[in-house]
Image (tube, coloured by chain):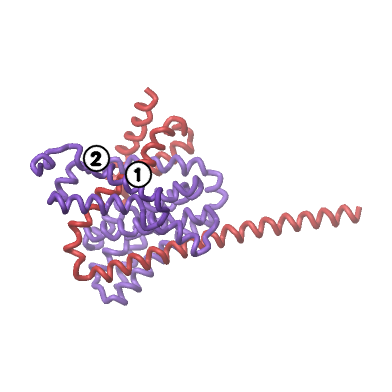
Amino acid sequence: MKGFLETSVFFGVWISLAAYLIGWGIQRKWKLAIFNPLLIAIVLVIVILLLTGTGYDVYYEGAKYISYLMTPATICLAVPLYEQLELLKKNYKALLLGILAGVLTSLCSILLLTVVFGLEHGAYVTLLPKSITTAIGISISEELGGYISITVAVIIITGLLGNMFGEAACRLFRITEPIAKGVAMGTSAHVMGTSKAMEMGEVEGAMSSLSIVVSGILTVVGAAVFAMFL
Amino acid sequence: MKYVKQIGIIMTLSFAGEVLHEIVPLPVPANIYGIVLLFLCLECKVIKVSAVREVSKILIELMPLMFIPAAVGLIDTWGLIQNAWMAYLVTTVVSTFVVLFVAGHVTQFVIRRTRAKAQADELDTREVLEQEAKEA
């Protein structure tokens, strides 16, 4: 069986899809943030891999075909964004200020927390790009001398947090304007937050998509400057 | 042929993004170039929304699935974080929610202030008009 899994082309994709559908079913039954389909899928796949003694590389050999679609899918976010063009033009000032404030807060809070925890420079620059899309995050971390695989991990945990608790956090923090919700989700939790924002509404989704692009670009510059502070 | 064309457009932009990433010496990945390119093409009416609508809908709906493989990779990263995992986790959690709070509230504040100002202006104009009407 183990030998078969290693050569199977569809195992990785199938197990991911099945786990996600199970997660989705569980969430529909118990509407709690902790029963996030994505989280359930990740935990299920990890448990199954550990139980069957299947290595991550074996799983990834098949699952990489899902990841392959990430770039085309991200590009498609331009469509909902374009459909909200009027809103974008009308509120450009609020959008830009909100995203800029978010990026600066991200960099400042990471600087502060790494000082509090006494982490070294390597860990600091590893964390700096945590709120932006993985592809930009990796190149920033690499450029500044961070630990790339840890950067990927913190980016994913950030996204998962936004995907799971972003909607509840908006409610708790009394962020009620759909545009502001979108900016909050996209700036704090990149594509994973955006995919949740898409479910919250068209405006939220579009503004969140915009936030990924703008915060990503601002962080490229911001992280390079902040890297000099510690 | 409708879907073939739609996929064709999206893959063309993906590849164009890759090409730009290769030739432009900036740490901007292919997907960011791609999203900007598609947005500009839509804005300049080079591509109609109807020419990419269905396939982009499918891909966006599939998106959450695409995070699973990378996230499962956390099992291989665990060994590296083990020693300082608390520091990494607390920093990640705190910073994520602080960013969400600040980004959301700054945006909301500016929107509401702009709206209040617009309403005040409207009110002023109305008052002036009423005043003029009275005087006349």
Identified by mark 1, the residue type is: Met
Chain in purple in the render? A
Real-space CA distance between mark 1 and mark 2, rounded to the nearest whole angstrom: 16 Å
Identified by mark 2, the residue type is: Trp
Is residue A36 among the parts visible in the rendering?
Answer: yes
Number of marks in the image? 2
Can you give x and y, in whole percent of width and height, for residue B19 in the image? 28, 40
Name chain B's colour.
red
Disc 1: which residue:
B63
Disc 2: which residue:
A14
The residue lying at 70 percent from left, 59 percent from top is: B120
Residue farthest toward the left in the current orientation of the protein = A3
Q: Chain of mark 2?
A: A
Q: Is residue B65 left or right of residue A204?
A: left
Q: Is residue A183 left or right of residue B131?
A: left
Q: Is residue B97 above or below residue B58?
A: below
For disc 1, the neighbor class at 10 Å (few under 14, some 14 to 19, many from 20) is many
For disc 2, the neighbor class at 10 Å (few under 14, some 14 to 19, many from 20) is few
Between tags 1 and 2, which lies in front? 2
Can you give x and y, in whole percent of width and height, for residue A176 in the image? 54, 58
In the rendered image, the quadrant that contains the N terminus of chain B is: top left
Q: Which mark is residue A179?
A: none
Q: Is residue A52 left or right of residue A186?
A: left
Q: Secondary structure at mark 2?
A: helix
